[in-house]
Image (tube, grey):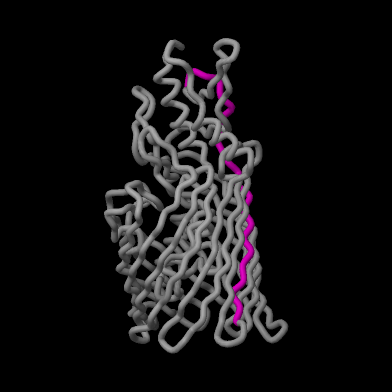
Amino acid sequence: MRLYSRCVWAALLSVGLNTALAVDYSWSGYGTIGYVRSDQPYNTQRFINNRGTLARDSLLGLQLDAKFNSHWSATVQGQMSPADDDDNLWTPKLSWAFLSWRPTNDWLIRVGKSRLLGYLNSENIDVGWTFDYARLPIEVYSTAPSVDFTGISISKTWEQWEGDLSLEVFWGSTDTAARYSVRNTIPGYIDSGPLFIPIQMEAKGIVLSYQRLDNLYRISFYRPSAERNDGGEWVDRPVLVNPMPGISYYSFLPETQLPQRSRQDISTIFVGADIGLSHNIRLATEYAKRSVKEASGGVNSSGGYVSLRRQTGRWTPYLYYAWLRSEDAALDLNRALNQTSVPAWIPNAPLINASQHAAADLFLAYDQQTWALGASYVLTSKSKLKLEWARTYIGVGSNLVDAPPDSEISDQVINLFSLSYNFIF
């Protein structure tokens, strides 16, 4: 893939040098200053707690578009936002860097770093000005391991049924990090707090979209494959150990013979629609399902949301319901890990009991529902103010929430209060 990336940049440079005298450049930018606070002391969505934070939603991006002629163009987009692999750092990142070739009006080929088109809002996921929610529903927009990739995409468009029908295929890869939150330190094995595992994702998929006026329908199949960049392997499931009759616990420590694999192949399907109803009301809905064969963790899950919004002058109030739920087997395992303990007289009992919670943190599980009520207000043609109250109920548990030490997140209610200023230029 490194050789492929070098070829991409060589092509970009070559086109730029050969057409430098005829290039039309244009700059644009976007940003969000977002404050959000919850009514709970523990973190949800990495940063949000009852102390409030600007880190969850705030960011700044710049984009340069270069048009060489009617067939060739290039786009580079950079962004400053919280790091993917550290909760305490903000880092610059290259969001887009691709070369586009449009041989005819109905064909488009992109080579370089771009964005997967699985979600309705994939391309504009960072541009808060383009949607009315304080943030896109996490129950759906967290299901893809990464929305960025470096590779190639090919799309074909047909004029059908008084609209545009497009089909896109893509292939590429990206480096990212999987985040976990560990409640308790296990001396010699793992420390408490955020844990980031560097991974490389290979992405390939197909997207079918239909757009007529402002209405958009989309279905996509996305098959990412993940490999750890730290030399480790994925553990499929912890092993049930019976040291003596009537006593059992789960082990995931290295001295146990665990089922492992060096690669995870994930199947993901997205279905979505954003359509206009009568009286300026719009309905939007998305559904996502992902699965990994033979894995017992919560990556095997489904999620979705349904929203209604209505534009009234400068105001657009909205209401949505969203959910994310792992398969029953993953939730049963999470419940068992959180509730398993051995008597103090068992050898290494403190280590064993601490490891149960750590295993629950590492073998993902999701069981949450959210109702959100909010509104956006158009200040100018390039700026927007948003207010939102969201109420999330956690059932068995959710790895979108960082459980406190010696505790678990189940049967909890989290209220989020958001205020943000969104702009483009």
For the stretch drawn in magenta, the main secondary structure is: strand
Quadrant housing residue 288: bottom right
Magenta-drawn segment:
254-276
Compared to 95, does 413 lie above or below? above
Front one among 29 and 75: 29
Examine the rendering and report whether any part of residue 97 can be seen.
no
Residue 270 magenta: yes
Q: Does the magenta run of residues contain 337?
A: no
Q: Residue 184, can we see it?
A: yes
Q: Is residue 166 left or right of residue 341?
A: right
Residue 183 position, x and y percent, is 38, 35
The quadrant in which the C terminus is found is bottom left
Q: Is residue 267 left or right of residue 347?
A: right
Query: Could you tell me which residue is drawn at 48 percent across and 31 percent down?
Result: 359
191 above or below 266? above
Q: Position of residue 330 (x, y in %)?
A: 59, 39
Task: Name which residue lies at 55% across and 31% down.
Answer: 336
Which residue: 39% across, 19% down? 350
Of 165 and 389, which appears nearest the observer? 389
Q: Position of residue 100 (x, y in %)?
A: 50, 72
Q: Is residue 84 above or below residue 196?
A: below
The x and y percentages for residue 423 are 34, 76
- The answer to whether residue 66 is above or below residue 236 is below
